Amino acid sequence: MHSHGKHGHHHHGEPSGGHGHVPKSETGIAIAAVLTGAFMLAEIAGGLLSGSLALIADAGHMLTDFASLVLAWLAFRIARRPADRQRTYGFDRFSVLAAFVNGLSLFVIAGWIVWEALQRLRQPVEVLGGLMLWVALAGLAVNVVAFVVLTRGEAENLNVRAAALHVAGDLLGSVAAIVAALVIMATGWMPIDPILSVLVAVIILRSAWAVLRESAHILLEGTPRGLDMGAMRDALSAVSGVAGVSHIHAWSITQERPMVTLEVTPAAGADPFEVKMAVKKLLAEKFGIAHATVDTA
């Protein structure tokens, strides 16, 4: 659970690029995309030459990494566009959509890796351990650099998290390929290559599910993560001049932009405007929700 106190906010018509973390994360994603795209080509060649499924699987994963990083980078660019008459909330949610698509793509990759591994276990293929080792070591170095660059940014941003998960999956893929290469060089036991590929696929799936679940929750207008609706209702009911609270709806545009709409019934003799201002102040100060639409009954 995280605090909502640091959440940024902007009003209709304002550009959504006001978040301080965007440029740093955007640059990190661009660097990671270039590194990943360049090494992917080398890894495809290495996998084909050595006959290693672990390397080819890692290269396939790197291809979607490259696509996901470009998508994540585009999401940051698009999210900075100002709101307009057609999209009054602006384009912020494009980054959540990008995270959702990236999460889905990880499931597809993992499925393909498992399928290929099963074929390899039935019909083992000769793997050149030496070449596989050097390519995997180079891949590990590239992935470590890309992962560090990405995780230096805003870790709470779903878009960055999804991109970092892709790279982390690759990093694990490189480690698995190194272990498989060492085993093949030492013992000549070829099944280690597809077996470790499946292990990486399972780890990828676990992480992908977390991103998919959270991005889907936001897209389905779920309650913001960490917001206790019961505590919020109790706090609102305790505001001076409030006789009742109803029709509370809370959702997020992105993780950084929680929104609330509600209706309050002012107590007899209370000034409706003052009650409304007191409710908005409480929501901003106690729950970190700066954008609230409050109606009075």
Image (cartoon, rainbow, N blue to C red):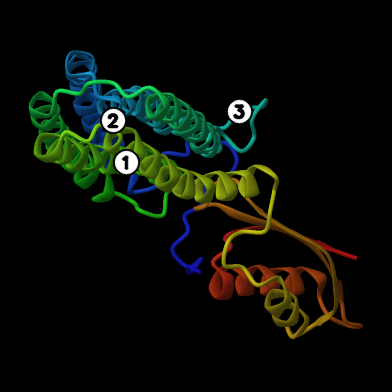
Q: Which residue is mark 2?
A: 54
Q: Which residue is mark 1?
A: 196
Report whether residue 203 is seen. Answer: yes
Left or right: 4, with 32 as reference point: right
Quote the CA–CA distance across marks 1 and 2: 7 Å
Q: Which mark is residue 69?
A: none
- The quadrant where residue 71 appears: top left
> Dots 1 and 2: beta carbons under 8 Å?
yes
- On the image, the x and y values in percent for residue 125 come to 28, 21
Left or right: 150, with 265 as reference point: left
Report whether residue 160 is seen. Answer: no
At horizontal 39% and vertical 30% (from top left) the residue drawn is: 121
**Mark 2 residue type:** Ala
Q: Secondary structure at mark 2?
A: helix
- Which quadrant is the C terminus positioned in? bottom right
Instruction: Give whichever of 239, 29 is nearer the camera.
Output: 29
**Mark 1 residue type:** Leu
Instruction: Give whichever of 60, 192 is nearer the camera.
Output: 192
Quote the CA–CA distance across marks 1 and 3: 50 Å
Q: Residues within 10 Å of mark 2 (few under 14, many from 20)?
A: many
Q: Which residue is mark 3?
A: 84
Q: Secondary structure at mark 1?
A: helix
**Mark 3 residue type:** Asp
Left or right: 274, with 255 as reference point: right
